[in-house]
Image: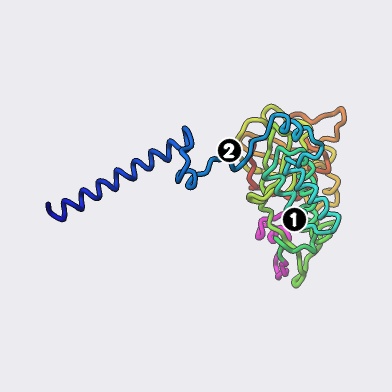
Amino acid sequence: MSLWTLVKIFAALCVMAVMALTAMLAYHVTIAPLGGVFEKIIPDPVRIVPGQSDDELAKMLESPEMPDINPGEKAFQKAHELLALGRIPEAREKLTAIVNVFPGSSTAPTARRIVGEINLDEILAASHMEGKQIHVVKRGESLLGIAAKYNTTIDCIMHLNSMMEMPRIQPGDELVVMPLDFRLLIEPRRKSVSLWQGGRFVREYPVLHFDASATQPRRAVINSKAAELDGRRVLPQSKEYRAAEKVILIDKPALQIRSWDGGEEKPAGGILLRPEDMEEIALLTRTGNEVEIR
């Protein structure tokens, strides 16, 4: 018998041994423990973790010291503690996690409201420069041209620079400018309109009324914005602009977002928001911003 034949016989015996061992291990795990070396390789779980009686399980479930099984509430409690200590960034991180990871938690609506207030305070504060720039006015520039350059609006520039009326800008003047790259998410089922910056939640607003045409899922853009006072149009540079009612017009098909004070005279059609909420959305959006109805 040649050496090569002996090698092939030995290899075949090894394969058969491995197959037999595998079959015995499978029997040991799925059917009945075999004991001996198999128990050393894969111990019997019943011996490692002793079973509990039904009475013991019932007592554990009825105990008033049951562990907290709602991670959303636990995270909210931690965020509340951080807010009390003035650790705003850490608190916002916890609250944002609730909004994104535990949207079904009972604390999620409150978390969204608090996160929105923190975000808005930073966005509208000229002292908080993240996402903002300083523009030095050059000869021949206008406020309208500066707004177009930075994808923002005259209204937003005036707000960030504490201008109550249209100013005369001079070369060398410094203006805080902020690109308005937000998008609107309209959710009829949740009765809300929310403001997003990419994938980052910014602020949510409750909707008072949805017209039937505003519930069909689609993507669109803000076609135009307007301000109305006593039935006439008011321009952003007017002294009357602050007191005027803001209107956002969405295309494909045409849809309005406007304010309603809850009185008997309800505007016809569109999406109706509280006046203060409409003011914020109008301030933070521009023509061309994306809109999604989901």
**Residue 137 magenta-highlighted:** yes
Along the line of sight, the residue nearer the viewer: 274 or 80: 80
First in sequence: mark 2 or mark 1? 2
Q: Secondary structure at mark 2?
A: helix
Residue wearing tag 1: 154
The amino acid on which the numbered mark 2 sits, given as a three-letter code, is Val
The label shown at residue 163 is none
The percent coordinates of residue 133 (x first, y second) are 71, 65
Residue at the farthest left position: 1
Q: Is residue 20 left or right of residue 127?
A: left
Q: Which residue is mark 2?
A: 46
Secondary element at tag 1: helix
Judge whether residue 13 is colored magenta.
no
Q: Amino acid at mark 1?
A: Ile
- Tell me what residue is drawn at x 65 percent, y 60 percent: 149
Question: Which of the 4 quarters of the picture holds residue 2?
Answer: bottom left
Give neighbour class at mark 1: few <14, some 14-19, many 20+ (Cα, 10 Å).
some
Q: How far is the residue under mark 2 from the one under mark 1?
A: 73 Å
Is residue 246 in sight in this rendering? yes
**Residue 3 place in picture, x, y as percent:** 15, 56
Residue at 72 percent across and 49 percent down: it is 96
Per the rendered image, the range of residues in magenta is 134-155
